[in-house]
Amino acid sequence: MRSTRYSIFFLWFLVLPLLVATAPEYAVGDQEPLPAINNPNPGSDLWEAVRGRLDSPATTQVEGFDSAVLVNQQGELWTTIRNAKLLPIGADVLIVVLLMIGAVYAVRGPVTVKAGPSGSEIPRHTVNARFVHWFLAGLFIVLGITGLVLLYGRPLLIPLMGKSAFGMVAAGAKNVHNFVGPLFPVAIFLLFVNMVSKNLYEKGDLKWFAQGGGMFGKGHASAGKFNGGEKILFWLTIFLGIGVSVTGYILDFPVIASWIVSTFPEFSQYRHVMEFSHVVHTVIGILFIALVFGHIFLAVFFVPGTLQGMVGGKVDANWAKEHHDRWYAEVQANGERK
């Protein structure tokens, strides 16, 4: 038995090198990869459906535009646009406008009446015109301040007053903004009806623009009751007012957004309309505030005497003659000087 085992071991020892020598060579790179094991995650389709990425819509027994949407990805996009775009760019716009106003005043200074006060006044604005102006101005101040609190209050006011106090301020600002806002389009409509006839283009407006409102050339630029710049202000106020009012109504009354979705199904759910309206509302609001900054500067500081006409209804005769010569001639022809 022992000799047999030795014989088998001896034969295996001789055959093993021959097997190794004749075995085929395999390069590692030539080996075919093993087939992948298809083991899909049973919850992947569920979460794809939750995020609304599948073609098949979700079903629910709860009625409403958003009831079948569990995760709204558009909300993240809106948050990014608001925090990363609207807030910093809006702040930059307002700061740049204020810096430009300061630079103009420092370089040019106020535009005074060369002839000095005449001691005689002429009627400038009627009671109706002044009421509409201050009604609109009052609404704008309230809506502008509350809007800025809602937009920039978190980074600016929380460090000053704390989260609890700011929470009460923000809640109050939101309620005031929502309840006062619906009156704004009423003021815009009254402004249009009351002043549109005097803010249409007339001969001489192009010359006023060519002279930069008196910034270029000699003397004051010729103007009617309202110069070219005031007419631009009027029409910008009308169009911006319409835009901020429409988007404001959508934000204030979601039923309008629901109607828009039913009319334009591409919005798919009314939250998209609300988010889009919020972005447009904010952009218009910031541009509107910048425009009003310029208006206040021109009326109060740059051209003294302008505010007097909107407060008391009358302006000095020499002021009217130098700043609005064509209108002054009409007043003189009608014998309205007092």
Image (spheres, rainbow, N blue to C red):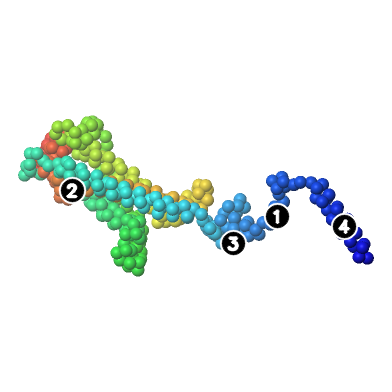
Give the mark toward the camera: 2 or 4: 4
Give the mark toward the camera: 3 or 1: 1
**Real-space Cα separation, disc 3 to disc 4, in angstroms:** 83 Å
Earlier residue among tags 1 and 4? 4
Earlier residue among tags 3 and 4? 4
- Quick one: SS at disc 2? helix
Q: Residue at x 34, y 50 (%)?
A: 90
Q: Amino acid at mark 3?
A: Gln
Q: Nearer the viewer, residue 79 or 136?
A: 79
Q: Position of 121 compared to 191: left or right?
A: left
Residue 21, horizontal then vertical, whole percent: 80, 48
Residue beneath disc 3: 61
Residue beneath disc 4: 10
Give the mark toward the camera: 3 or 4: 4
Q: Residue at x 25, y 48 (%)?
A: 98
Q: Are marks 2 and 1 in contact (CB under 8 Å)?
A: no
**Real-space Cα separation, disc 2 to disc 3, in angstroms:** 61 Å
- Quick one: SS at disc 3? loop
Residue beneath disc 2: 300
- Quick one: SS at disc 4? helix
Inspect this view and state whether residue 264 appears. yes
